[in-house]
Amino acid sequence: MSTITPHANPAAHPAAPAARRTRPAGLTAEVVFVRRSLTHTLRDPEALLMAVLLPTMLMLLFTFVFGGALDPSGGYVDYVVPGIILLCAGFGAGSTALSVAGDMTTGVIDRFRTMPLRASAVLTGHVVASVLRNLVATAIVVAVALAVGFRPTATAGEWLAAIGVIALYILAITSLFAAIGLAASGPDAANAYGFILLFLPYLSSAFVPVESLPTWLAGFAQHQPITPVIETIRSLLMGTPVGDQAWLALGWCTLIIVVAATWGAWLFRTRTGRR
């Protein structure tokens, strides 16, 4: 008389395949979440349009309304465009906080956590898609600036260096906004917290030289992270002296990325672990 061993053949048992689920190879999960975020962007063209329109309208306002008083020579557009580029990056990155906060409150994260995926893939998707989206928006703003009289003197190498600094800044501020989206209680709170960061370019050398500000404000404007980034881009595009601003810009961006990534990873583990 023969003896039959229960579940001797794993393929014949319906629960066996689920027990052998493995994570997708390589960066497959990250690519899927980047595509998901870009798809959401295409389905919400109004948000992308506003991220481009707002800084463009500010550039036109400062150039044609205030520019004559700030620089009677008519070259104010060459001064203000680097600051407008960072303003555009801030508006675009702000939507990342809303998207992350939305994911945290709608329950979709619970579904993702049941899948064999790296937890970081969700945030990586939001950040990478935002960087790509913001680079496109920045290119549109620069094209409009060229159409209204922006005349940079940069060589091809200086243009590449400027694009690299802009991309690094976008990565830094997007990572910070993603962490803010995790820390906020919902999309409305994330929007309110992000407004504080969007205000920083106005307190820098974006629109007027730091030396023209009141003494108590000039100290803050000179030493906050955005001023060296603006001065580095302005130097690369317009040939102004850069001094040690480039090293300060790289240092600030790197520090923000490290702090935001560490803070975001901790928040994600803490908040999703409580669910």
Image (cartoon, helix red, strand yellow):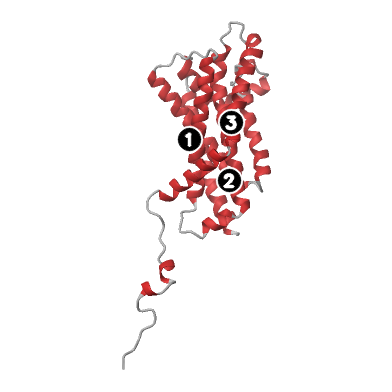
| C-alpha distance separating marks 2 and 3 | 20 Å
In the depicted structure, whether residue 133 falls above or below residue 274: above
Amino acid, disc 3: Leu
Q: Which residue is mark 2?
A: 100
Q: Looking at this rendering, what residue extends furthest in the left direction?
A: 1
At mark 1, the secondary structure is helix
Q: Among all residues in the image, which is located at the extreme bottom?
A: 1
Which mark identifies residue 238?
none
Front in this rendered view, residue 266 or 97: 97
Residue 218: which quarter of the image?
top right
In space, the residues marked 3 and 1 are separated at their CA atoms by 15 Å
Crowding at dot 2, Cα within 10 Å, few <14 / some 14-19 / many 20+, comes out as many
Can residue 157 be seen by looking at this rendering?
A: yes
Q: CA distance from mark 1 to mark 2?
A: 17 Å
Q: Please tell me whether mark 3 or mark 1 is closer to you in this view.
A: 3
Which of 77/17 is in front? 17
The image quarter in which residue 176 lies: top right
Mark 2 belongs to which amino acid? Val
Tag 3: Cα neighbours inside 10 Å, few (<14), some, or many (≥20)?
few
Residue 45 percent location from the top left of the image: 57, 35
Q: Which corner quadrant holds the N terminus?
A: bottom left
Amino acid carrying label 1: it is Leu
Mark 1, residue position: 132
Where is 103 relative to 10, above or below?
Answer: above
Using a 10 Å C-alpha cutoff, classify the residue at mark 1 as few (fewer than 14 neighbours), some (14 to 19) or many (20 or more): some
In the image: residue 105, left or right of residue 247: right
Element at badge 3? helix
Query: Mark 3 = which residue?
Result: 49
Residue 69 x %, y %:
66, 9
* Label 2 element class: helix
